[in-house]
Amino acid sequence: MLNLLLALLALFALANAAVLGLAAVRGRVWPRAEALGLGAVVNFLDTLGIGSMAPTMAWFKFRRMVPDALIPQTMIAGLTLPTMVQSLIFLLLLGVGLDPVLLLGSVAALLAGGVVGAGLVSRAQPWVVQALVGVALLMAAAFYILSILELMPVGGTATSLSPTLTIIAIAANFGFGILVNFGVGNYAPTLALLSLMGLDPRLCFPIMATGASLAGASIGIQHVRAGRIDLSIVLAMVLGGIPAVLVAALVVKSLPLTTLKWLVSFVIVYTAVVMLRGAARGRKMAAQTS
């Protein structure tokens, strides 16, 4: 089972890299320096457990790097390959000790949800995307604050779940896969859910990273081919992110991140409010012109 997932990761990574590389060559795209640094920072912190999607969305909005309606697509395409490196590391270190049915089922469900949701975000009105991104940011901030205050579920020591809980976990991951398209990261809700069910929190990481990797690859390929992303940003985030993941996972391994989490939480809440205000204005304008 583990070898199957590793093979799928390799296949999806090659496909994602090939599509991204060909698009960059055809468009004569060069990576942007700011996005290179952003990719390195957010993926370094993501590997250490602070997350990457919410900080990336906040920075995109703060710096106006990407139009609001294109933030989820550009972010997913830029974060996918570095997350695949994370997934490889987590699978090799922790995947052997995890129930294969739970692992494969959750990963497959997240991938399916990602594919289903990809069409939704591309057809959604800009104000709808703004609103969903704003809600996603508020959810992320809430999880950050809960983790800082040590109110997140502590989890148990289980390496598997009962059949009923396994089905619930797999179904939930399908929903998480749909929401990934709108910038709602699957890490925090998956960790909270499986920890509440009694799973060893360490064993959540292979599930979270592998599901996000495969879903992100599928989603990213669709958006690259459709031209709905900023390739210069995506390329830079990939090139900056992969080395940062390796350094964080193999060299640094852990850091005291409480102060940084508070700072990130405040920035995310502020950005969420800005996005929601923009969505409200966009909805009003859409209503007036209809």
Image (cartoon, grey):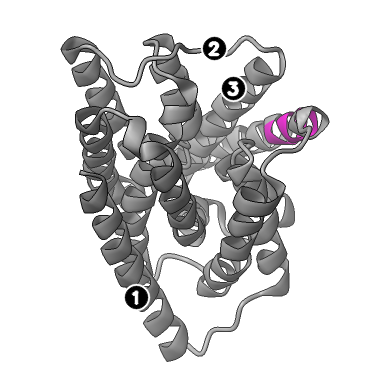
Tell me if mark 1 has few (under 14), some (14-19) or many (20+) residues whose alpha carbon lies within 10 angstroms of its own.
some
Query: Where does residue 96 sit, x and y in percent of width and height?
Result: 33, 37
Residue picked out by circle 1:
19
Q: Can residue 113 be seen at all in this image of the molecule?
A: yes
Numbered range of the magenta stretch: 262-268
Which residue is at a point 60% across and 49% down the rendered structure image?
Answer: 249
Q: Earlier in the sequence, mark 1 or mark 2?
A: 1
Comparing 148 with 3, the one in front is 3
The amino acid type, in three-letter code, at marker 1 is: Val
Quadrant of the image containing the N terminus = top left
x 46%, y 82%: residue? 24
Q: From what the image shows, is residue 45 above or below residue 79?
A: above
Count the marks: 3
Prevalent SS, magenta region:
helix
Q: Residues within 10 Å of mark 2 (few under 14, many from 20)?
A: some
Q: In whole angstroms, how far apart are the C-alphas of marks 2 and 3?
A: 13 Å
Disc number for residue 143? 3
Seen from this angle, which residue lies furthest right?
259
Which three-letter amino acid code belongs to the residue tagged 2? Val
